Amino acid sequence: MKKSVVKSILAVALGFGLAAPSLAADTIKLGVAGAHSGDLASYGLPSVNAAKLVVEQVNANGGIDGKMVELLVEDDVCKPEVATNTATKLVSDGVHVVLGHICSGATKAALPIYNNAGVVVMSPSATNPDLTQSGDYPNFYRTIASDDAQARTEVDFALNVLGLKKIAVIHDKGDYGKGLAEFAKMFLDKSGKAEVTLFEGVTPGAVDYSAVVQKIKRSGAEAVIFGGYHPEASKIITQMRKKRMDTIFISDDGVKDDTFIKVAGKYAEGVYATGPKDTSSNPLSKKAVEDHKAKFGSDPGAFYENAYAAALALLNAVDKADSTDMEAVRNALQNNDVDTPVGSIRFDQIGDAVGVGFAMYQVKDGQYVEVK
Amino acid sequence: MEYFTELFFSGLTRGSIYALIALGYTMVYGIIGLINFAHGEIYMIGAFTSFVVATVLSIYGFPLLSIVLLAGLAAAVWSASYGYTVEKIAYRPLRHAPRLSALISAIGMSIFLQNYVLLAQSSEFQPFPELIPDFDFMEPFAHVVGSSDLVILLTTALVMVGLTMLIKFSRIGKAMRATSQDRTMAMLVGIDVNKVISVTFIIGSALAAIGGMLIASHIGQINFFIGFIAGIKAFTAAVLGGIGSIPGAVLGGFVLGLTESFATGYVSSDYEDVFAFTLLVLILIFKPAGLLGREAAEKV
């Protein structure tokens, strides 16, 4: 009942939309920018395929408000200096919305050019936190969680769900682990709700972690947030439990791996780890993958589903906004849910997709189970 | 004070393992003047052998004590045969070649063995069965020092005493000392030098294998790469104590283990290796032959 009301309102809105003069162009030009050649091409090409499939589908259904969607594909080789040319080219070709870029650096370089031209950009893969959080890029959106999203999930969980006050942050000194740990520490410090009792790196591969485990104990931490991979995590958790410490252990998707459970065995029980939300059972995701196999005869590559989602979200927003004007499209992105392969998403003020990202899992009876 | 004790025991455990592996380095160096870089891999192979044996035996439901003994024995024998073979095919033909050739051969052997285990097993970490149970009498102290730490310490002590006795009082020990002093002269007085060298490799490898089994059981996991880092650390311990000297290797192991443990505990684990290697540099500057090493007189 309610649904049909919404539908009829939408239909009316669409009707008005058709009459609106703001859609002056003959076609809606969707730009696809990213690495389509060079050593990072494997990250960029799946987004081209995703865009092709989405556009084909939209055009087969009569386009957007009667206008066909036209694809403009430009290569930026993932290089910031090339990306500015790519952006200029797309803008001078009259692009309306852009799917891309792929790499954070190239995206950053290109964004001001699109912003000046009033073009909304949505990346399937640029994860640099600054892109949304700095507020410098009002025209930027993305369908992937930012680099710090995992740390944020971990910290939110520790503070709000577990209500912890004292937390030790440990990492493996690697780019991934240390980066995550630094974000976690930053969020903890900012929150003011908990104290970081210890912030340290351990040496991967060391024969013994008992000294650092003692240190965790002495710091009085109720929980450890560990940034790193499962070999170190399983050693640390094993030695903590052997020292009769029941400190809570929270980690990342480097640990959300069955090998961790296999190696740490009974000591893995109760460990928390964040991991990407599981979208494989989403019917849209299945369909997107099957369409790709049917059309291109291969499995889709990296960020394919995120790109597919971005293309859908952009075209849906243009449809809802009945305009390609930047403010109108931004409003539409922020106020409408759209069903995509990565779930039903909308965007927040700063441009991150709500509903995309990480969930918390816990080891129960030798298996990772999502914590609801 | 309790914190200090905890760190002390943690350092001793580490140190014992370093010492067990360092013995192999130092014995071989003492006798043929070769740094056997494949020694870390022998340690890793020992850990894997005990892993396979212990896993199979536990499937058949053997009691834990017999599993430990059999797995240890199998690891020692198997690693010893590897050590023997490595010496025979990689070092013996180069006995009279320049030292550098043997060194390169040792590094090659190390890479070969690593990749061989990588292919034969897998690159994944394997869960190592807990061979050392939690003793009931240790329960009140479990938060300070674990049962496995205790077993590691005791085993190391036993092995040290045994090895010292062997070298001091047995015929083969005497032959080893003679060979290490002067190989040509030892040959002249009728010592079978090749046999002595083989025995040295066999003993060193067996000790490393026991170390491998203990530490794998202590940390609960193994993969093909564990020998590399442990080997480097043990080699450092051997140099620290004075390479070629058996008590030196033990002392070096403990000094290194304790330094790392206290550096982690009182400063930061970020700088664990920095402290360990700074110590090494300092000792080599002020005592170039290591803590217990003899200054070799330059022969003119």
Image (cartoon, coloured by chain):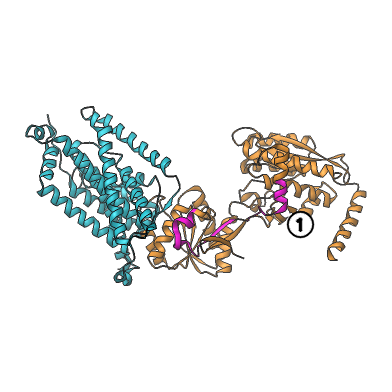
Chain colours: A orange, B cyan
Q: Is residue B11 above or below residue B192?
A: below
Which residue type does callout 1 highlight?
Asp
Instruction: Verify whether residue A280 appears in magenta.
Output: yes
Q: Please state the horizontal and vertical placement of residue B253, each as a whole percent of the image.
A: 26, 51
Question: For this view, does A192 lie left or right of residue B28?
Answer: right
Question: For this view, does B181 lie left or right of residue B213?
Answer: left
Q: Please state the horizontal and vertical placement of residue A202, each as a whole percent of the image.
A: 41, 54
Question: For this view, does B149 lie left or right of residue A9?
Answer: left
Residue position marked by numbered label 1 in the rendering: A337
Residue at x 87%, y 63% (from the top left corner): A5
Q: Please state the horizontal and vertical placement of residue B200, each as a whole percent of the image.
A: 20, 42
Chain part drawn in magenta = A259-288
The residue furthest left is: B189
10 Å neighbourhood of mark 1: few (<14), some, or many (≥20)? some
Q: Chain ID for label 1?
A: A
Q: Is residue B259 visible?
A: no
Residue at x 75%, y 56% (from the top left corner): A334
Q: Is residue A245 above or below residue A182?
A: below
Helix or strand or loop: what does disc 1 sit on? Answer: loop
Q: Which quadrant is the C terminus of chain A positioned in? A: bottom right
- Asked whether A341 or B65 is in front, the reply is B65
- Asked whether B136 or A326 is in front, the reply is B136
